[in-house]
């Protein structure tokens, strides 16, 4: 067992070596990288701040083409993808993501309550923008 003396006192804190090894291992892995894709810049910024406050590294893209370029250039652990965007819509982006990185989880995040079933099959989860933010955080933690 490791013993650590707390600064400014004689109290000793004993830490289980196995727990310490687990914490070290988790720190070595670093934060999970989430790519958020949305053409609404304010929502994208808010999502980035929220996810970073929960310990995620967050990359953002404001279009499907930009998202695909970022996936090619970065190690991404999960993608949060808006569906209705100009240019490539979320279903087209998800299909291309599946081709390029088949194991990266995708969460559709949309203001709309229903999306085409064929496109929904490309995603691991679907959350509406009106759902509580905690739901998105929990889904990311489950999938990433």
Image (tube, rainbow, N blue to C red):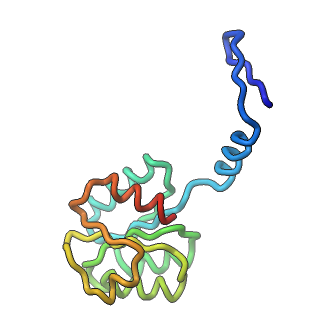
User: Can you name the residue that lies furthest to the right here?
Assistant: 1
Q: Could you say which quadrant of the image residue 118 lies in?
A: bottom left
Q: Residue at x 79, y 29 (%)?
A: 2
Look at 40% across and 55% down and name the residue there.
137
The residue that appears at 76% across and 38% down in the rendered structure is 17
Determine which quarter of the picture holds residue 115: bottom left
Query: Is residue 60 or residue 24 the one in the foreground?
Result: 24
Query: In the picture, which quadrant includes the N terminus?
Result: top right
Using the rendered view, name the quadrant where residue 19 is placed: top right
Query: How many numbered discs sit on the rendered protein?
Result: 0
At 33% from the left and 86% from the top, the residue drawn is 119
Q: Is residue 113 left or right of residue 29?
A: left
Q: Nearer the viewer, residue 36 or 104?
A: 104
Residue 123: image x %, image y %? 39, 78
Q: Is residue 128 left or right of residue 143?
A: left
- Camera-side residue: 129 or 72? 129
20 relative to 49, above or below = above
Q: Position of residue 56 (x, y in %)?
A: 49, 54
Q: Position of residue 83 (x, y in %)?
A: 29, 77
Residue 54 horizontal side relative to residue 109, left or right: right
């Amino acid at each position: 067992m490791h013993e650590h003396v707390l600064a400014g006192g004689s109290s000793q804190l004993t830490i289980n070596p196995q727990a310490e090894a687990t914490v070290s291992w988790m720190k070595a892995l670093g934060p999970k990288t989430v790519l958020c894709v949305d053409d609404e810049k304010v929502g994208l910024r808010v999502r980035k701040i929220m996810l970073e406050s929960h310990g995620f590294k967050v990359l953002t893209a404001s279009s499907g083409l930009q998202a695909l370029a970022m996936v090619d250039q970065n190690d991404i652990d999960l993608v949060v993808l808006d569906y209705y965007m100009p240019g490539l819509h979320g279903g087209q982006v998800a299909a291309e993501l599946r081709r390029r990185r088949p194991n990266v989880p995708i969460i559709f995040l949309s203001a709309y309550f229903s999306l085409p079933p064929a496109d929904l099959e490309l995603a691991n989860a679907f959350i509406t923008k009106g759902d509580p933010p905690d739901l998105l955080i929990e889904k990311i933690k489950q999938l990433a």
